[in-house]
Image: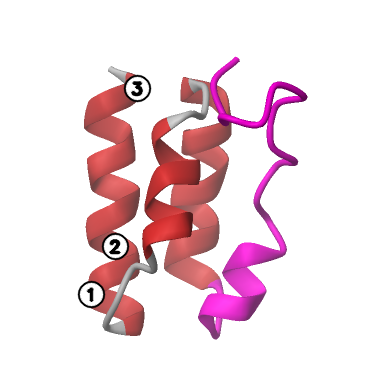
Amino acid sequence: REEERSRLVHRTILLRFGAVPPDLDAHLRGLSLDELEALFEAALTAPSLEVFRAHLPAPAPNGNGAG
């Protein structure tokens, strides 16, 4: 389910803002379902990609975004 939600958030960002930077794409793939649910709402309502990024949770301490 996380992978499906990650794709949905990715597509929403792409449609709203025109591009998904590679670092953001990688960050999305490491998030939990709960985090992705919250980010989906942010992707729908944020007025800019910068505002959307402010909603991202901090990366995991191991640095790969998985956790």
Question: Residue type at mark 1?
Answer: Leu
The residue tagged 2 is 12
Sequence-earlier tag: 2 or 3: 3
Q: Is residue 33 above or below residue 51?
A: above
Distance of label 1 from label 3 (alpha carbons):
20 Å
Q: Who's the residue at 51% across and 70% down the image?
A: 45
Q: Is residue 18 above or below residue 14?
A: below
Q: Secondary structure at mark 1?
A: helix
Question: Residue type at mark 3?
Answer: Glu
| Side of 66 relative to 1 (left or right) | right
The residue tagged 3 is 2
Residue nearest the viewer, comparing 42 with 66: 66
| Side of 34 relative to 44 (left or right) | right
Distance of label 2 from label 1 (alpha carbons):
5 Å
- Magenta span: chief secondary structure: loop
Mark 2 is surrounded, within 10 Å at the Cα level, by few (under 14), some (14 to 19) or many (20 or more) other residues, namely some
Q: Secondary structure at mark 3?
A: helix
Residue 38 is situated, as x and y percent measured from the top left of the image, at 57, 42
Q: Who's the residue at 70% across and 21% down the image?
A: 62
- Chain part drawn in magenta: 46-67
Q: Secondary structure at mark 2?
A: helix
Disc 2 and disc 1 in contact, CB within 8 angstroms: yes
Question: Residue type at mark 2?
Answer: Thr
The residue tagged 1 is 15
How was the colour assigned to the protein in this rendering? secondary structure
